[in-house]
Amino acid sequence: MPETGTCKQTGFLDDNYQQAGATIGDATEVWNADIVASVNAPTSEQISLMKPGPY
């Protein structure tokens, strides 16, 4: 699930992902997912949105 608007820099719009079947979410939904993949290391704010548990 890409975060809303985060892919504009790559030239892909939310609509492109939705047309391919992806669900677009806000930061809370994305960082609270069971599995999170990120190109860069998450910020402290992003980490605070993640589910607690063993990693």
Image: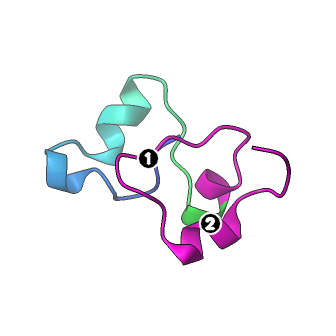
- Work out whether mark 1 precedes mark 2 in sequence or the reverse, and give the earlier one: 1
For the C terminus, the image quarter is top right
Q: 13 above or below 47? A: above
| Image quadrant assignment for residue 23 | top right
| Image quadrant assignment for residue 15 | top left
Q: Is residue 8 left or right of residue 40?
A: left
Residue 12 pos. (x, y %): 21, 42
Q: Nearer the viewer, residue 7 or 40?
A: 40
Mark number displayed over residue 53: none
Main SS, magenta region, reads loop
* Range of residues picked out in magenta: 29-55
Mark number displayed over residue 47: 2
Q: Is residue 2 left or right of residue 36?
A: left
Q: Nearer the viewer, residue 38 or 18?
A: 38
* Residue 53 part of the magenta-drawn span: yes
Q: Residue at x 83, y 58 (%)?
A: 52
| Image quadrant assignment for residue 9 | bottom left
Residue under pointer 1: 38
Q: Is residue 8 left or right of residue 24?
A: left
Q: Nearer the viewer, residue 52 or 34?
A: 52
Name the outermost residue toward the bottom: 45
Amino acid at the residue labelled 1: Ser
